[in-house]
Image: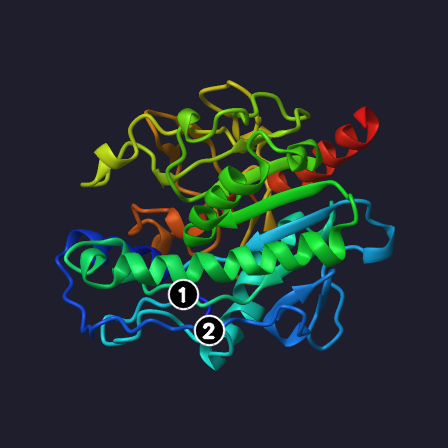
Amino acid sequence: MHPWKLFLLGIGLLCLTSCGVQYRSTAFKTDLTTIAYKDKQNWAVFAGKTADGNDIGEFSETLQADVFFVYPTLLTDNKDTRWNAPVQDSIICADIQKWIIPFQASAWAKAARLFVPYYRQNHYRAFFEPYLSKGGQKAQELAYEDVKAAFEYYVTHENKGRPIILAGHSQGAIHLKKIVQEYFDGTTLQQQLVAAYLAGTRVSEDDFKYIKPLISPEQTGGFVSWNCYKKGKLPKYADWYRGAVTTNPINWDSSITSQFSEHKGLLYYNQQLIPSCLTVEVTDGLLWVSLPKVPKRFWVSFVKDYHRFDVSFFWQDIRENAVLRVREFLKEN
């Protein structure tokens, strides 16, 4: 994947939702295959290590908490008729290792041991009609069953009572919202929840009965969520966002705006960390973000939908906040 693809995907996904893109599709066929998550090859990262043994973040043995991370939709080609991506799809697995792990999942790796399962994620078209009712819902359910199976394996065999961070983006956050509802909300496992970072999807306060939005940077036991868009602009599908919980991922409190000096750091495509390069403004269901002050910002100026950057824009902010929340959780427990 060319470095600029991360930025151009932001344009591409906006067009998919607003320009009437037509997809090739087929009838959905039920897949009864189960993924064996006891097999480490079915994990992009397991206990802080990649399949080839490389450490992600801090040395795992020194960390007292875990983070279960679920990656976003990478199956987007409008000519691809598959409803779900195979777990060992070589292109998707390569993109996860090259882009998702270093630019998203690694943001939590200083705070906790990282677990990232491969799963049969559904194609992007599965979220929209007419595809949703013609196989898309079943494709989403298959993807969730994989995430659920991976989480159950992790909790049963690896967690051993450790504090848990849930983190995901886009489709990953959609599946994790269900994990929170099914496994944490009002259960004994809720007592182990440091925080759920549900970026890039719509989350409302009434999605959960007992788990609430976090409104201070050190608070634990709840969730945060945001959806980025260029400051002053609204998507054509803005009504979908209205009423959603919108966290300020710079100050992590009830602040509606932020200052450049408060921004800890954007992780650029060349892995350069750039601090103090953007501001945010919380609006109804959206997080407006100023045009980042980055090299070659001319190209970024064409992008209005910042969905693809929900994590990388605040990589260092998330990193420091996750460490803080784990520290506070361990103090309180």
Say which mark, if any, is on residue 110.
none
Tell me where residue 195 sits by quadrant. top right
Residue 41: image x %, image y %? 63, 76
Residue where numbered disc 1 is placed: 74
Name which residue type carries label 1.
Answer: Leu
Looking at the image, which residue sits at the far right? 62
Mark 1, Cα crowd under 10 Å, few <14 / some 14-19 / many 20+, is some
Q: Is residue 178 left or right of residue 233?
A: right
Return the x and y of residue 166 as percentages of the image width and height: 60, 44
Residue at left 57%, top 46%? Answer: 167
Amino acid type assigned to the residue bearing label 2 in the image: Ile
Work out whether 255 lies above or below 190.
above
Q: Residue furthest front?
A: 32
Residue drawn at the location 62% of the way across and 52% of the way down: 68
Q: Nearer the viewer, residue 28 or 7?
A: 28
Q: Position of residue 174 (x, y in %)?
A: 42, 47
Asked if the residue at tag 1 contacts the one at tag 2, i.e. Cβ–Cβ closer than 8 Å, the answer is yes
Q: Which residue is mark 2?
A: 92
Against 237, residue 88 (above or below) is below
Q: Position of residue 11 (x, y in %)?
A: 29, 56
Examine the image and state in which quarter residue 115 appears.
bottom right
Q: Is residue 162 above or below residue 43?
A: above
Quarter in which the N terminus is drawn: bottom left
Above or below, 289 against 18 in this view is above
Q: Is residue 299 left or right of residue 42?
A: left
User: How many other residues sit within 10 Å of disc 2, few (<14), some (14-19) or many (≥20)?
Assistant: some
Q: Check disc 1 and report its element: helix, strand or loop.
A: loop
The residue shown at (49%, 81%) is 90
Ranked by sequence position, the earlier of labels 2 and 1 is 1
Looking at the rendered structure, the number of numbered marks drawn on it comes to 2
